[in-house]
Structure formats: structure tokens, C-alpha cells
DNA sequence: ACTAATGTATTAGTTCTCTAATACACCCAG
DNA sequence: CTGGGTGTATTAGAGAACTAATACATTAGT
């Protein structure tokens, strides 16, 4: 797993790791059940303290992205089947509300937001081969 | 303007002010051009330091919600006309991407997200009389 | 010009966040 | 049961965030 972190861009290291792993999972580059590098290995690779990696993994676990087991290692969790649909939607509520509120401030309509989402979504995974 | 802040809920005071003012504006309870209480007045009302209120107002100004002028006071800005449309959409990009990423993690489709947004939007301002 | 009201700037102290150093606990292959 | 590999816990220190105390600068009315 190849990650790239910057020590001076202001955003915390552990958060950079979280974001990049989340991206890899979302992009399908890390499949459910796949092994994530051990804390020490990734720490050495990135030249940072193991605790910082542990912090990142802990956050990923808290969000249900990965599953950690002492002695065994860390793997990508099977989010798809773990939560019922209504629970997933509940998790998505706050960020959705935040987006709508910001749009409202800017006097943009719901349809504007939806159009923006479609555009962004298309840009994120360009379903080229279909 | 009636605000309610909690000193021990963890979230910074200035941020609570920001959120509540943003809500009042979004809900139409504070119209464009309306006066916001002077820094000292609100500070005294909330029993906090004027600097904390100033910090909140500064943030609101930075986001284009209010307009401050020394000697005169602070008023609700006319967001609608201040920014060009493409700039508004640009501001909405990051939260939109964040929402899509989270949805992807949960294996929810774009259409699911859009449906959720419509639902939330309807709940936020229940255009009852239509 | 004066004055009262407003936002602005400087400084400081407390608390929280982030990272690290180090030691501990668990799991599994041999 | 032992050893190497794994995640976990404790402590500490540097830095940033938050709030406050206090003084300064600008505006508008008189």
C-alpha cells in the first residue's frame, strides 16, 4: 500500500493516512478482507512514529472502514453487509444536512446541489468501460 | 437575537455562535441587511469575553454571512449577489465530495444520496402551503 | 471637535491536539 | 511453550487552539 504524506502541509499526519485509506477503499483499490500493512511496517515506511499510524487505524476502525485484531493484523472491513440500509442513511444524515445548509446560505437550490453531486460523482469514478 | 451557548459541551463558544447565526440566516429569521448585536452587547448577554464574539463574527464575515464595519456595526450580508455562481459552486465542492466519499464507503449509490438530500431538504423547510 | 458606540489589535494563560518514546498484551506458527 | 509479529496502553513534550484582559482605531451623531 503506497501512501504519501506531507509533514508540513498543516493537516495532521494521522488524518492524511485516514483520508488516503478511505480513498483507496472507496476507489476499490483495497477490497473487503484485504490486509492493511501492520502499524510498525507502515510507520517505518512513512518514517513516522507507530503511534501515529495506530491513531489513524483506530479512527478507520471507529468509522467501520477497517477491522483490527491484536496479534492478527488489520484488514478492510465488510462495510457493505454489516449495517442495515437505514443505519447507513442515518450515518449520512449530518453531512447531508451540512451540505444543504451551506447551499442555502449561498442561495443555491436543491437542484443545483444535486446537479453538482452528479458532476462530482462522475468525476470521481469515470465509468469509462461500460 | 437570542442565542444559547453551552460552556462545557466541548465545542468552542465562538463556533456555537457561528453555527447558530448561520442557522438563523438560513432559516430566514435574520434577513439580509439586518443588524446583528454589537460585539460587546452580545458578549455581555452571553457572559463571555467580547473577543470571543469578535472571533465568531470574524468567521462569519470570512464566510460571507455578515458584513462588519468599524464604528457602524455588523449586518447580515447579501450573499445572494456577492458571489458569482461558479464561485458558490466551488465553495460547495469539498463538502459535496466528502458526502459522496462517505456514501461510497457505505456502498450507497448516487441516487440514494440524492433521494436522501431531497428528503432532508423537505424536512428542513416544510413548504407546507403549496 | 467632542463623545459615545462600534470593530480591531496585542498579549497572555489555559487547555487541547498531535506526535513521539517506551513498555505492555495478545495471537499464532514452530 | 517459546518467539516473532501484531495491536494496545501510558506518559510526556511541543505546538496550536481557545478564551480572556486590556488597549487602540474608526465611525456617526451632536
Image (cartoon, coloured by chain):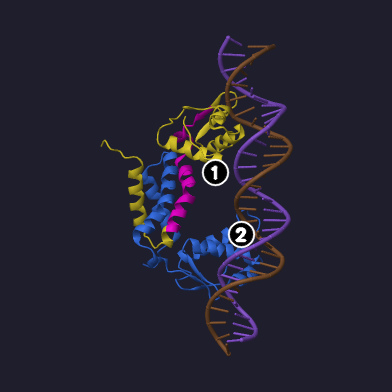
Chain colours: A blue, B yellow, C brown, D purple
Q: Residue at x 46, y 31 (%)?
A: B2
**Does residue A37 appear left or right of residue B86 in this picture?**
right
Q: Residue at x 54, y 63 (%)?
A: A58
Mark 2 Cα shell of 10 Å, populated few (<14), some (14-19), many (≥20): many
Q: Where C22 falls versus B65 (above or below)? A: below
The disc placed on residue B8 is 1
Q: Where A13 falls versus A68 (above or below)? A: above
Q: Quadrant of residue A80?
A: bottom left
Overall secondary structure of the magenta section = helix
Q: Where D10 falls versus A40 (above or below)? A: above
Q: Position of residue B87 (x, y in %)?
A: 48, 43
Read off the magenta span: B74-102
**Does residue A79 appear left or right of residue D22 in this picture?**
left
Q: Does the segment drawn in magenta span residue A15?
A: no
**Viewer-nearest residue: A92 or B87:** A92
Q: Residue furthest left?
A: B130
Quarter of the rendering occupied by the N terminus of chain A:
bottom right
Marked residue chain, label 1: B
Q: Position of residue B78 (x, y in %)?
A: 46, 32
Q: Position of residue B18 (x, y in %)?
A: 51, 38
Quarter of the rendering occupied by the C terminus of chain A:
bottom left
The disc placed on residue A13 is 2
Task: Quote the CA–CA distance across marks 1 and 2.
Answer: 28 Å
Q: Where A57 falls versus B89 (above or below)? A: below
**Viewer-nearest residue: B6 or A86:** B6
Q: Does the segment drawn in magenta span residue B99?
A: yes
Mark 1 Cα shell of 10 Å, populated few (<14), some (14-19), many (≥20): few
Marked residue chain, label 2: A
Helix, strand or loop for disc 1: loop
Q: Is residue B57 visible?
A: yes
Q: Is residue A3 visible?
A: no
Amino acid at each position: 500500500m503506497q501512501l504519501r504524506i506531507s509533514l508540513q502541509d498543516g493537516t495532521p499526519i494521522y488524518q492524511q493516512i485516514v483520508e488516503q485509506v478511505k480513498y483507496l477503499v472507496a476507489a476499490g483499490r483495497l477490497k473487503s478482507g484485504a490486509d492493511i500493512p501492520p502499524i510498525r511496517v507502515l510507520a517505518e515506511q512513512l518514517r513516522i512514529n507507530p503511534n501515529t499510524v495506530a491513531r489513524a487505524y483506530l479512527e478507520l476502525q471507529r468509522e467501520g472502514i477497517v477491522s483490527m485484531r491484536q496479534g492478527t493484523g488489520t484488514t478492510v472491513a465488510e462495510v457493505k453487509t454489516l449495517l442495515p440500509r437505514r443505519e447507513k442513511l442515518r450515518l449520512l444524515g449530518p453531512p447531508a444536512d451540512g451540505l444543504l445548509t451551506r447551499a442555502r446560505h449561498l442561495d443555491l437550490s436543491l437542484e443545483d446541489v444535486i446537479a453538482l453531486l452528479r458532476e462530482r460523482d462522475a468525476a470521481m469514478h469515470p465509468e469509462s468501460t461500460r
